[in-house]
Image (cartoon, helix red, strand yellow):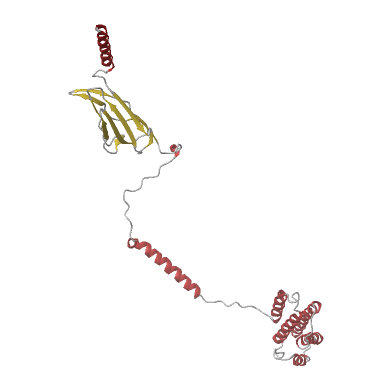
Amino acid sequence: MRVVTLVVVVAFAMVCATRSAAQPPLDTTGRVTFRVLPDTVTVGQPFELRMTIVPPAGRIGIAPAVPDTGGIIEPLDPAEVTRRGDTLRVRYRLLAWQTGVLSIPLGPVLMRRDSSDIAVTGDMRVVVRSVLPSDSVSRVPRAARALLTRPVRWWERWWQWMLGALALFTVLYLLNRWRMRPRIERVVDETPLSRADAAFARLDARRLVDAGEGGRHVALVAEIVRRYLADVEPSLALSLTNAELLAVAAPIAAIPQRQLVLLLQQVDAVRFGGMRIISATAQRVGGMAREIVREIERARASSTTRAA
């Protein structure tokens, strides 16, 4: 029985000794861990510093104060402190205003017991990269704008309105002068022959023969010849019928009677007989009309020469 009691006492003593050896000393520094989220930011981008403080037995952890404003790294708002038992969790929201690997300017963590403090420091850093492109060295920045630009009211630009009104008045004046300029009548020296040649050219451009309108072509050719005759001889008016025209033209020696009779017969055959004119006939009648005009012009020129 005594042996059993002695064994129990020895075992109890060994357990107590083991527990005493496992307990940390009262003045150890404790444990401080931190994390930067995200660890790489751009200039002016908010980031967080999360810190976990586990003080040693018998001491209380005290988180460092936020950095001063106006520095390279400054706080966004006060630190958020959460205490669960002896463990202290602190969350800082910060901004960085310079590129590079920056140290976060926080003071040491204090492990306090009565009037005795143990300071625990940590190397807390954040990487700040530039928002500029890689080739920004060759870029030339724009000149700075004026601090304050006062808007100019429309009535303050009176000289611009005056210049605009003067330019408009000048344009209107010159336009009116151009419209009221004296007209110079163009004197065109037209002769019966030139008018007849122009009429023949216009008729050829219409290509009535190619369109199958030979009868119309013949009628217009005769109309040109009759207008030419009225120009050179007032007695051969357009109001005369073909028979009356032949009767009046018979005494005039300059007019080729046979060609004129054939031409007017073709016209009467088309108008009153409904004769269909083929292409070859229309071309022959056109050539006959031109020959009549040329014969009359030669006769007139010859008579003028003899009179001179």
Against 127, is 283 above or below? Answer: below
Q: How many labels does the image show?
A: 0
Residue 263: x and y in percent read 78, 84
Q: Dividing the image into 4 quarters, which one contains the N terminus?
A: top left
Residue 199: x and y in percent read 70, 78
**Is any part of residue 102 visible from this angle?**
no
Give the quarter of the image for residue 292: bottom right
Q: Dividing the image into 4 quarters, which one contains the C terminus?
A: bottom right
Pick the residue in front: 98 or 305: 98
Against 192, is 98 above or below? Answer: above
Give the quarter of the image for residue 66: top left
Residue 223: x and y in percent read 72, 84
Pick the residue in front: 108 or 135: 108
Question: Residue 45 vs residue 5: left or right?
Answer: right
Against 138, is 10 above or below? Answer: above
Q: Residue furthest front?
A: 1
Question: Residue 108 vs residue 214: left or right?
Answer: left
Pick the residue in front: 11 or 34: 11
Question: Residue 263 vs residue 239: left or right?
Answer: right
> Residue at 40% across / 64% down in the picture?
164
Question: Residue 115 vs residue 92: left or right?
Answer: left
Against 231, is 157 above or below? Answer: above
> Residue at 25% across / 23% down in the picture?
119
Give the quarter of the image for residue 255: bottom right
Q: Which residue lies furthest to the top in this view?
A: 3
**Is any part of residue 34 visible from this angle?**
yes
> Residue at 32% across / 33% down in the picture?
49
Pick the residue in front: 45 or 54: 54
